[in-house]
Amino acid sequence: MINSTRRTFLVCAAALGGVALLPRNALARAAAPILRAAPSNAQLVPSQYPATPVWAYATEGVGTVPGPEIRVTAGEWVRTRLVNDLPQSTAVHWHGIRIANAMDGAAPLTQTPVEPGSTFDYAFETPDPGTYWYHAHHNGTEQIGRGLAGPLIVEERDPWLGQPGAATRELTLLLADWLLDDDAAIVGGRWDDLHAASHSGRMGNTITVNGKTRPAFDLRLGERVRLRLINAATDRVMPLALPGLSPRLVALDGHPVPPRAVETILLGPAQRADVVIDAPQKASAALSLQLNPGNGEWSGIAGFVLDGDPVVPEPGEVRPLPAWGTLAAPDLTEPLRAAVVMEGGAMRGMDGASFRGERMGFRDLAANGIVWAFNGVAHGLEAPMFRAQRGQTVQLQLTNRTFFPHAIHLHGHHCEVQPRSGAFNQPGDVRDTVMVGADETVDVAFVADNPGKWMLHCHMLSHQQSGMMGWFEVT
């Protein structure tokens, strides 16, 4: 394991690294739309250390970490053939897209995992503009932990950039958490570590932004920029701050929110935030994207370098993003009510749960790698947690009886946070991944208008892998 001095260097290198812009490839327009998953190497840490063996996506050439940015306009289709050159089966989930069920990539529920040497064709429409991402959805703790993730950006039909009050350009920043040894290799052999899984999950010692430790991004004096922030960590919750840059939140999980000033942005695993920043009009002290890793101290994980002549005139009030106009509003007069109760983990535990159709005690569950459950059922793939008719409003009561927070991801839909919102959410926000704190209950509602069998799971992937997964059906 990396020693404390080395760890501090890797996470918070004092010297700014190079600019970490993402490779782009619009698969919807590609002549040979291949998305290849294969072993590769990535220079995650400064060049005096070895490159890290990773698993990576590529549309051409050698795979990159993150995978190539896929960028389309709302209403366009993404078409790609997954080629699996990994040593294990895989699948790709298009996180946050309200997608046809067969294309969701949620193996083994919506498709059979793609075996090594095999292919699978994905084709889906992108109905809603916003910041999304794609990632492995089979053995996710290891596969995402080795690098299988990339941004998926759906642009507005009517351009927002360049309009009065809007940003002049944007940056996509995909944040990842790596557990590296002294040779900058990923610490393997612990993907199913039950001690980590029963706590906060697999915590890394190296944070990257676009595959680099503390990269630097140029900002023109007075410039307004849209940041698309993606938490692609397997388990780490990321409290973020942008001091000196007047951050205003304009979207969560792709869905627009009225612009609001924020001091911190908390992103659970898989959550995204679009934030508008204004660079100072005059040169100032060093500016950075900062992370609080849980020890109370803020550390820079990406830097901003001011340059150029000041922007004139100043941008003024932030222009809201255009409304989706495609998401049905929940009707709470007679909703289908369903409960999701989170149980297990360290400090609380559980007496037993149903696993693969059999009631087991705690010791037998642990022997099968299970320490978490929903509603007393672990890895509940045998039967749905609830069934809804197409067009029916569902009101979900998310109750956390554990000692740890959980990031609950709803496949195929977005949900509206209700007045009982908990510490991590605001009523009225629309999310596809909802943070629920320890001993909290959060109510959400959505219209079940996308037919099929949909996963519902914790996106702390160590928790999902060790039991916190189920599904629901829309008929």
Image: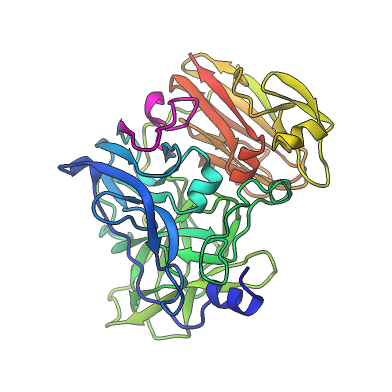
Which of 376 and 313 lies nearest the eye of the viewer? 376
Q: Give x and y (percent) for residue 423.
A: 68, 49
Q: Is residue 315 left or right of residue 298?
A: left
Main SS of the magenta part reads loop
Q: Nearer the viewer, residue 319 or 296?
A: 296
| Residue 8 x, y percent position in the rendering | 60, 76
Residue drawn at x 39%, y 37% as measured from the top left: 116
Task: From the top left corner, tell me how far across and down residue 269 is, in percent.
Answer: 56, 49
Res. 455 in view: yes
* 105 w.r.t. 314: above or below: above
* Quarter of the N terminus within the rendering: bottom right
Q: Which residue lies at the image location 55% right of the left edge and 63% below the top edge?
A: 240
- Asked whether the viewer can see residue 261, the reply is no
Query: Which quadrant of the structure image shows residue 333?
Result: top right
Q: Using residue 325 as the reference point, say whether residue 292 is left or right of it.
A: right
- The verdict on residue 63 being magenta is no
Q: State the residue at coordinates (41%, 76%).
A: 304
Q: Is residue 115 magenta?
A: yes
Q: Which residues are magenta?
A: 96-121
Q: In the figure, 342 relative to 240: above or below?
A: above
Please name whichever residue, 456 or 184, is drawn nearer the observer in this view of the structure.
Answer: 184
